[in-house]
Amino acid sequence: MEGIGGDRAPVASPLPQWGHDTWRMYQYYLDKTTPHTTYRWMGTLVIAAIYCLRVYSVQGFYIVSYGLGIYLLNLLIGFLSPLVDPELEISDGPLLPTKGSDEFKPFIRRLPEFKFWYSMTKAFYIAFVMTFFSLFDVPVFWPILLCYWIVLFVLTMRRQIAHMIKYKYIPLNIGKQYTGKKASTSGSSLCGD
């Protein structure tokens, strides 16, 4: 009865161990891509272009594209929204300043950039794989879906932009902001001219 109550450690099956090792390797390389924002987004654009070429070449899977568009719109709204919505919650945590005299508090996204990129990339990949199964090729009149998606996008973005204007926040980092003139660091000012 060595297996019951013995001093030996349980032997792990090779299949779960292989799955765990594969997941750790995947997570390791995913973590290494974190600082390389430009290259990550370029890769996502390549995957999106491959997906678009696939849909164009087979002339189908418009319902998959519509579902992908709705999901991407949902991700975009999460990316542009603050973590704490001043309209809905009164919180003790960081809030957006509403007056000029309020203390500056940094904009914290509801959906961080990395998760936005990762979810978008996974969505394009899953949609691409779905184009290989005829089950998902539902015959629809695609111009109606496109018009409906455009109307949905415009109405949603108009509401989001109105919210941004009302609470005076800009969710995009446009670059380093300078206030006033830059200080001169040339050598001539050190000589006493």
Image (cartoon, rainbow, N blue to C red):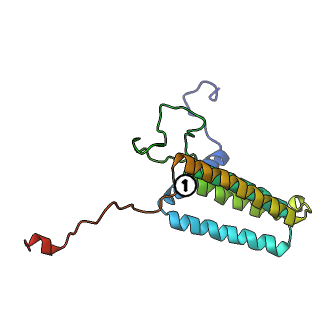
Q: Residue at x 54, y 31 (%)?
A: 90
Quarter location, residue 56: bottom right
Q: Is residue 55 above or below residue 150?
A: below
Could you tell me if residue 18 is visible in this image? no
Q: Residue at x 81, y 63 (%)?
A: 147
Q: Residue at x 55, y 39 (%)?
A: 84
In the picture, which quadrant includes the N terminus? top right
Q: Is residue 12 above or below residue 49?
A: above
Q: Is residue 63 above or below residue 165?
A: below
Depth check, front residue: 103 or 141: 103
Return the x and y of residue 175 as percentages of the image width and height. Answer: 43, 63
Return the x and y of residue 44 as percentages of the image width and height. Answer: 62, 65
Q: Which residue is mark 1?
A: 113
Q: Secondary structure at mark 1?
A: helix
In the picture, which quadrant includes the C terminus? bottom left
Depth check, front residue: 143 or 100: 100
Quarter location, residue 88: top right
Return the x and y of residue 10 as percentages of the image width and height. Answer: 60, 35
Q: Residue at x 56, y 32 (%)?
A: 8
Residue extending furthest toward the right: 139
Depth check, front residue: 165 or 178: 165
Which amino acid lies under the numbered mark 1 shown in the image of this protein?
Glu
Mark 1 Cα-neighbour bin, 10 Å: few <14, some 14–19, many ≥20:
some
